[in-house]
Image (spheres, rainbow, N blue to C red):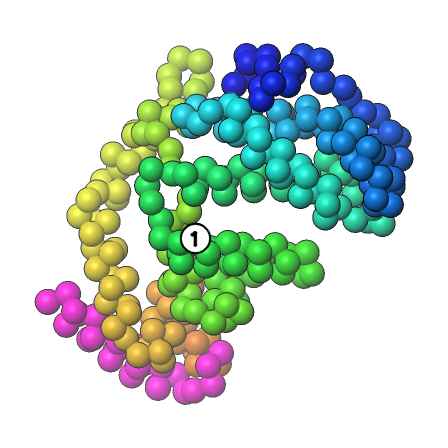
Amino acid sequence: MINKVEICGVNTAKLPKLTVQEKEELMKKIKEGDEEARAEFIKGNLRLVLSVIQRFNNRGESADDVFQIGCIGLIKAIDNFDITQNVQFSTYAVPMIIGEVRRYLRDNNSIRVSRSVRDLAYKAIQFKEKYIKENNKEPTIQEIAKELGVEREEIAFSFDAIQDPISLQEPIYNDGAESIYVMDQVRDPKSTDELWAENMTMMQAMLKLNEKEKNIIMRRYFDGKTQMEVADEIGISQAQVSRLEKSAIDHIKKYYK
């Protein structure tokens, strides 16, 4: 992709480059409905698309296909860009282009993820982006789950399911003399098949708990909170938290057996 001069019939070596002032003037015309300005603006930003899609090399996808998807992201960015905000167009457009390409790669991945799981993940991402914009911080998994009306485990699972797979041979560090690959990390005794199976069993056991037990276990063992902190948060006594926690652990032990 990097060395390809012509993509989708476009000679990338001869693409125009717009100045900041030209972009601003064209964008004003676009918002007034000028189609010629729109076409010129798109052509003047194809270099931006090319620079963004470089990070998706070696995914086994056609350069033409990825370029076209990147252009869709560019067009969406143009349509949604707010000229009243003090933000450069490229700053706004890059995440839009990346998001569009990632969605394409996920939907065409050989590892199939159900439509319902993907849809949930995309809804969660949209809420997350909106929340960050409004609050200048990321929402917790619990807040996302509450907004979408699902269990927090479902949100965590959906996020994991849409992660892009990587090669075990992908280098993660190189000091010039020695390289460390992903495979070197998964050989860690903490990343064994047995531990993976145990974690899966634990998640299945969690689903068997009632809401109050599940809530307490999540806060105690996933969020690392004390029994007193949990008691304050959910409005019961520390003794009740202790009793419910013991009951939940007993239920999990029975599931393991």
| Number of other residues with Cα within 10 Å of mark 1, as a class: few under 14, some 14 to 19, many 20 or more | some
Which residues, given as a range, are shown in magenta? 233-257
Query: The C terminus lies in which quarter of the figure?
Result: bottom left
Indicate whether 201 appears above or below 62: below
Residue 223 is covered by the magenta coloring: no
Q: Residue at x 80, y 37 (%)?
A: 35
Farthest residue to the front: give it. Answer: 35
| The quarter of the displayed image where residue 193 is located | top left
| The quarter of the displayed image where residue 212 is located | bottom left
Q: Residue at x 62, y 38 (%)?
A: 72
Tag 1: residue type?
Arg
The number of numbered discs placed on residues in the rendered structure image is 1
Q: Is residue 64 visible?
A: yes
The one nearer the camera, 70 or 226, is 70
Q: Residue at x 44, y 27 (%)?
A: 61
Indicate whether 124 appears above or below 57: below
Residue 253 is covered by the magenta coloring: yes
The one nearer the camera, 93 or 257, is 93
Where disc 1 sits, the SS reads helix
Q: Is residue 137 visible?
A: no
Q: In the rendered image, which residue does mark 1 sit on?
A: 118
Image position, residue 140 (x, y; %): 52, 62
Image position, residue 52 (x, y; %): 60, 29
The one nearer the camera, 98 or 188, is 98
In-image side of 20 versus 116 (left or right)? right
Q: Main secondary structure of the magenta part?
A: helix
Image position, residue 133 (x, y; %): 68, 56
| The quarter of the displayed image where residue 251 is located | bottom left
